[in-house]
Amino acid sequence: MNSGKPTQALFKHATTDSGPVECLGRTFASEDERRKYFLQKLKEKLADPAFRKIEGFPLGCDEDILRLSDPPYFTACPNPFLGDFVRCYVKPYDPAQLYDRKPSAVDVSEGKTDPIYTAHSYHTKVPHKAIVRAILHYTEPGDLVRDAFGGSGMTAVAAQYCGYPEAHFKRLVEDEWNTAGGNSPTWGARRAVLGDLSPAATFIAANYNLPLTLHEFLEHAQRILDDLKTEIGWMFETLHADGRKGFINYTVWSEVFTCPNCSNEIVFSKAGIDFDTGRVKDLATCPNCGANFTKAQLQRLYETYTDPATGKPAQRLKRVPVLISYTVGKTKYEKEPSAADLELLSRIEYLPLPKTAPTVELPYMHMTHERARMERYGVTRLHHFYLPRALQAMGRLWQAALAIDDRRCRNMVLYLVEQAVWGLSLLNRYSPLHYSQVNRYLSGVYYVASQHAECSPWYVLDGKLKRLGGCFATEFSQVNYAAITTGTAAHIPIPNASVDYIFTDPPFGENIYYADLNFFVESWHRLTTDATPEAIVDQAKHKGLVEYEMLMKECLTEYYRVLKPGRWMTMVFHNSSNAVWAAIQESLSSAGFVVADVRTLDKQQGSYRQVTSSAVKQDLVISAYKPNGGLEKRFELEKGTEEGVWDFVRTHLRQLPVCVRKDDNIEVIAERQAYLLFDRMVAFHVQRGVTVPASVGDFLAGLSQRFSERDGMYFLPDQVAEYDHGRMKAKQVAQLEIFVRNEKTGVEWLRQQLQVKPQTLQELTPQFMREIAGWEKHERPLELRELLDQNFLLYDGDGEVPSQVHQYLSTNYHELRRLAKDSPALRAKASNRYYVPDPSKEADVQKSREKAILREFDEYRESKQKKLRVFRLEAIRAGFRRAWQEKDYETILNVAERIPDEVLQDDPMLLMWYTNSLTRTGRDG
């Protein structure tokens, strides 16, 4: 691949007669010979019963797996060639190689209208151009990028796009780097190993990333659409008012209800829709008796028919066509269906089902039985999602695509055709205010609306084919830069420490039921997801938050194994649940990763904000690294000692950003603050089963002795000059945004205010009250004075003026000079102000505070209450930390059982101590 020459699109355009082909160290006479060889190898592998027992193996027969696969680059099952791909094409880990990168945030909202992004729909995607920026930051050309939750393949697209950037995008990125003061990025394709549990996802990813003979694909696809029109075009014909023949774009169908008053039929589109606004009327009027009812008061009308798949009577909702949109020549018209139109629909209904139409029963799953309740629509099998005419069109399209001999063209035509699977189904809602009725289904759910737009296949696919032709056009290339596997992220058959960078967007909690949604398309492929190892919260499959955390831990542990030491992982998080956020943090820490940065994109300001306490209703970008081998080896020798503590802190500080500027401001880096450094250090020890040889007070004292402090942040000696230089150029330090909800966030907010200037209780009170965003119900309410007295120092006017108070007064030079002549006046001016203790005194403050809160913990531990309703969470944290130090795991487990589950699950530190105590006592099984 010529990385020096930018092209207009990513996708490669292969030739039919490609000549000799090199693949995994072998040379083949052609692509066909390569395919024959590796297909035979895959066939032999499928015959091994042990291979089929791999966790996450898709549900289907060998024939369907082989038909979809294009080994060794893509298999519709666990890819047995991944290890060979890595060994042949990827640079082995070299501990002596110099590698130094700081965290980089990713704009997850960018480029969602890009032709590549929209070439095929999927439930969630991160735009490939956002991932390109991350890959350029963390890797070099030829490096290996991994995404085991690959979805539709955007990470692999991005890895290759680094070698084929569009000219304007290349200039944009280089300008961004220059503005940030860095060197220009090193362009050039990276390799990618991509995986997903879903065959539907990996099939999309393969078609995005494998070389394509574009003109052959376009010819095959156009021929199929033309042949379909010749074969069943009559099904979509209608007569115009003047007798001319028109061609149907879409037909609007309406549910039929019965009137609770007179039992007359009510066609919902006519009685219940305001066509001026496109919205459901508050009241629908019965055309027979004139009574008014809300939609919820109307009764659905069912009709009995013979199911063509089973030959047995079945029930379905009654629907009638109410509007036809059609074209005569180049002019579009609308009309109500005529008697001829209704007779045509009646004829089509009695045609036999297409052979390729899936008729399998819907399995029990959350999407169909707990939320959308598909059975009330009479939808219990896959073919019930389609009206007879749409099913004829969809089935014949699928059959024609399967008949293509050339494997690559066949899969690419299926890639086109499967985009009509949702759009031709009953899930496609009619929206009178939208110009186009293509793909109007509600994403992320099986939802059948009262109005359905039954589109013609050409209305859906003609425009899509033209767009794909433009999107996939590029120069010739025979290089395969991606290897794709279908299976669980917890099993990645590649060598240890072989991956240079991980970008991943895994499932989060119960946001999206991927396996349920993919079942719809996968049933057409006759190859479906084994949802057993799917890492989601799904009550229908008996997966709660605990199971989700365990599954994620397995996947992240495998990520940790394959990542090279000292290298990075970027994880995109979409969930507003604190419990899910805590589970992710615990899973990351348990796997061995160290979180270095968490940011959320402010879409209004177009900038990132750091997140320190809880999940918010925005996309988060988590940057985590695998500690280098040197630290791990040293820690084995130093664990449990004070030197092990400071070795970790030094290594961690080296991984963090030094100076982050936003416009004319400099940003406080949350991870460099004392309390987050302490939490990271504790987590590093706990996850490795080691007692922490430093209390909060000892840690804070040691931190100030060993590292330079600036603006509440700590730096290595060689980092201070860089920060000071940036600080001189900035107008001010931009503080973190903190939402006061509990004691911890309250103390963080107070520290932020008092670092700016010492203040009195009277000055702080009104500010503090405005910042409280609703005190958490389980937290014992604390007065502001109590927070101040236990965490800060108060100057009462006696003795020497503390340095921080003196510094505050010195901002007004003239007043200080006047007061300095009279020390009582200076002391009076400074008195009754709370201030952040000097580092030398911070340890004493924390030791005093910890004694007080540990007394409270002992009260909770000895209490006879079965459940603690209101308590001091900081006391629970301190008590768990002490119990861990004393290896008193039973105390942790006993107290954990007495606090509400949601509190335990919402707090990553409590969850860490709890889960590790379960492991230590053998109760985690």
Image: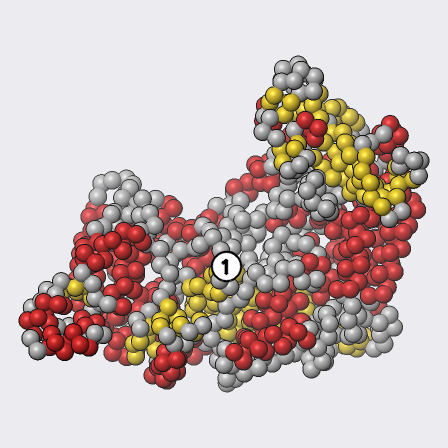
Query: Percent from the top left, x then y, of residue 651?
Result: 39, 77
Task: Pick the residue in front: 8 or 382.
Answer: 8
The answer, for residue 501, to whether it is visible in the render is yes
* Quarter of the view holding residue 346: top right
Q: Left or right of 402: which side holds 735?
A: left
Dot 1 alpha-carbon crowd within 10 angstroms: few under 14, some 14 to 19, many 20 or more: few
The image shows residue 854, relative to residue 7, as above or below, that is above
Residue identifier under label 1: 604
Q: Residue 257 occupies which quadrant of the picture? A: top right
Chosen colour scheme = secondary structure
Figure quadrant of the N terminus: bottom right
Vertical position of residue 239 compared to residue 704: above or below: above
Closer-to-camera residue (28/584): 584
Q: Residue at x 78, y 49 (%)?
A: 460
Residue beneath the point at 92% across and 40% down: 245
Name the one closer to the observer, 633 or 144: 144
830 on left or right of 476 = left
Q: Is residue 342 left or right of residue 695?
A: right
Q: Residue 680 in the image: x percent, y percent?
A: 36, 66
Q: Quadrant of residue 768?
A: bottom left
Look at label 1 and name its amino acid: Gln
Callout 1 secondary element = loop
In percent of the image, x 23 and y 58: which residue is there?
764
Q: Position of residue 702 (x, y in %)?
A: 25, 75
Q: Residue at x 45, y 50 (%)?
A: 577
